[in-house]
Amino acid sequence: MIVYDEHKILFILDGLDESKLRLEFDKNRLNLTSVSESATLDVLLMNLIAGPLLPNALIWITSRPVASSQIPSQFINRVTEIRGFNDVQKDEYFQRKISDPETARHIISLIKTSRSLYIMCHIPVFCWMAVNVLQDILLKGNKEGPKPQSLPTTITEMYLHYLRIQTNISSQKHGSTSAGGTQCTLMSNKDIILKLGKLAYDNLESQNVLFTEQDLSNCGISVTEAATCPGLCTELVEFEYGLYPKKLYCFVHLSVQEFFAALYAFHEFENNRFDSQKALSRRKGSSRIDFLKGAIDSALNSKNGHLDLFTRFLVGLSHESSRDILQGILERTNSSSECHKKLITYIKNLKRKDLSPERCINLIHCLLQLKNKSILQNDNNEASSDTLLTPFQCSLLAYKFIISEKPEEFDFRNEKNIR
């Protein structure tokens, strides 16, 4: 509640994460007190937040955690986290979005067959994506419904289906649908898809989410091409000084950008062209297991988790099911089962003591992309042993209880190996 007797001004700074400003709260820069004094935008913003400038003003900032972490805690009075949909609201969303009640009930039952995907539906954009993907799969299924193997069971598969659907929609809209079906349509759009992937990947490390026409041009994307990608890339208009409009572009959601970045990185690696050091630590020519380990190591070394979802997608793209969905872009190769066994062992045996719960949970989500049911097994035995659990094993145990639909009892007071 705003007390107007004390506060005359309210500043609402919406989307701090979309700003390219670097906020470095150095004491020597926090000395601006006069509203008539000229200063650069970053200095103005920092002094407004820290208090020297207009100390009685209220400031409300919306941002993703990655960007808001730039602000020292002593300058923050209250943090409100938007949690998304609860289970009841998820079902309500599906029922409102889908006109046919029977289809809505069917889709709700389908999404609930994958506990991890149903949990992900607390994010509204993921709920929207799930509706589009599952409706499309149902329409293409026979009278008995879609085959179980055609339903997405991981977040990677959901985004792969979304890309497939949006590519088909774009091709139909612009009269370029291929007579050879989805695979041929994907092949004919492979060039622009990989260009979008390069755009996403090149801006991953800098955490840039808004792109100029020059940014697009640097990746070989014309304005016309960008306009043919509905659902993937959106055009915005930013007015500078109120006179000269400047067009900016962004992906429809940050997660879509991270997916495209992973798709590009994986495709380039598989074709032995990947030699960028921007987000991954392994060099060109390394094996697939080394490539994935490098991605995981890079994500673990990120303080704010900006590589978490990218790494999750990267691991998911290494699964054979990804090639089945995206035939025409990802080529079929030898089985990855041996690579995945090594990756599971590598993650489960991580002994690092500096792993935060957030990084550990992301490792679990990476493993879930491999569709290996043994991942969540045997953790109770590990918890009952005399060996001290690693941070990852503790998170794995906690995650199992979180996703369990049936109540389970586990008395941590009796476990000497959990600290």
Image: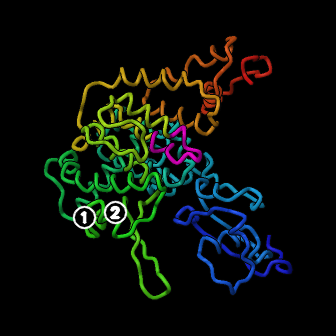
Is residue 254 covered in magenta?
A: no
> Is residue 242 depicted above or below 150 in this figure?
below
Residue 98, how many percent across, how many down?
Answer: 45, 55
Q: Residue 169 vs residue 38: left or right?
A: left
Quarter-of-image position of residue 354: top right
Q: Residue at x 33, y 25 (%)?
A: 336
Alpha carbons under labels 2 and 1: distance apart = 10 Å
**Magenta stretch in the rendered image:** 299-311
Q: Is residue 405 visible?
A: no
Describe residue 346's horizontal placement relative to residue 232 as left or right: right
Question: Mark on residue 173?
Answer: 1
Hey, what amino acid is under mark 2?
Answer: Pro
Name the residue carrying label 2: 230
Res 177 → quadrant? bottom left
Q: Secondary structure at mark 1?
A: helix
- At 21% from the left and 43% from the top, the residue drawn is 328
Mark 2 touches mark 1? (CB < 8 Å) = yes
Q: Nearer the viewer, residue 357 or 39?
A: 39
Residue drawn at x 35%, y 36% as measured from the top left: 283
The amino acid sitting under disc 1 is: Lys
